[in-house]
Image (spheres, rainbow, N blue to C red):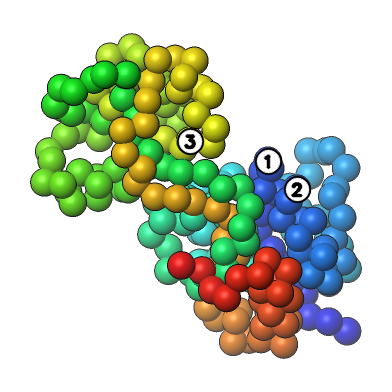
Amino acid sequence: MSETLTIALPKGRIFEEGIALLQQAGLPLHLPEKSRALQWRMGHVTLLELRNQDVPVYVDLGIADAGIVGKDVLAESGRAVYEPLDLGFSRCRLSLIREVGATGPIGRLASKYPNLSRRWLQERGLSAEVVKLSGNIELAALTGLADAVVDLVQTGSTLRANHLEEVEVLMHSSARLVVNRTALKLKRDQLRPLIGRLRELTGTTSAP
């Protein structure tokens, strides 16, 4: 009998695409019917549906053996999980955004990514207040709450619709496989072959 494997996935698009990819890799998964359930047992695999920001925490602390999460969320978390693969989907970029034509100093910056925002400021020798927000980040630049914001950009259509523009790309992001380092040793007979199959499917050699 196979040992149980627990996998953490974030709600939304990555949840659906992650299940499809893991299914192709040989795990006995299917997309659960809509319900209020937060975990599912499928064969020897238990799926946990979490908020994006919680996936690195559950994997790092060993509640989940592995997970899928965006590189942006992983970098913001600072969690020391093993990151063997760039899975290549949910691509986007984390960018500094301002009103079109804004050139004044940045005294206050708003973002869902305060750690990455502070790092960007420090790397440029800039001093600014960083305000953490949780939604509609662009509104902070439009209302004067902040002089600039740091947020994810996919198509840029929201920026164009609100007279905003990308000033600088802080990092490019995509979905990453993350693995608990202890589980990698204790469940190597399950996790190593899974990593190998995902590597073949995605055509990647390692996560940059």
Is there any visible trace of residue 131 in the rendered image?
no
In this picture, is 134 found above or below 77?
above
Q: Nearer the viewer, residue 130 or 138?
A: 138
Q: Quick one: label 2, few (<14), some, or many (20+) residues within 10 Å?
A: some
In this picture, is 136 found above or below 38?
above
In this picture, is 75 found above or below 27?
above
Q: Nearer the viewer, mark 3 or mark 2?
A: 3
Could you tell me the amino acid type at mark 2? Answer: Glu
Callout 1 secondary element: loop
Q: What is the distance, in whole Å, between disc 3 and disc 1 at their CAs?
A: 17 Å
Residue occupied by mark 2: 16
Residue occupied by mark 3: 153
Q: Position of residue 195 (x, y in %)?
A: 66, 76
Q: Position of residue 157 (x, y in %)?
A: 53, 24
Q: Position of residue 198 (x, y in %)?
A: 70, 71
Q: Is residue 26 left or right of residue 57?
A: right
Mark 3 or mark 2: which comes first in sequence? 2
Residue depicted at x 71% and y 74%: 200
Could you tell me the amino acid type at mark 1? Answer: Gly
Please tell me in which quadrant of the rendered image residue 201 appears.
bottom right
Contact (Cβ within 8 Å) of mark 1 with mark 2? yes
Mark 3 or mark 1: which comes first in sequence? 1
Contact (Cβ within 8 Å) of mark 3 with mark 1? no
Q: Position of residue 118 (x, y in %)?
A: 24, 45
Could you tell me the amino acid type at mark 3? Answer: Val
Callout 3 secondary element: strand
Please tell me in which quadrant of the rendered image residue 197 appears.
bottom right
Residue occupied by mark 1: 12
Q: Quick one: label 3, few (<14), some, or many (20+) residues within 10 Å?
A: many
Callout 2 secondary element: helix
Which quadrant would the N terminus be assigned to in this image? bottom right
Q: What is the distance, in whole Å, between disc 1 and disc 2 at their CAs?
A: 7 Å
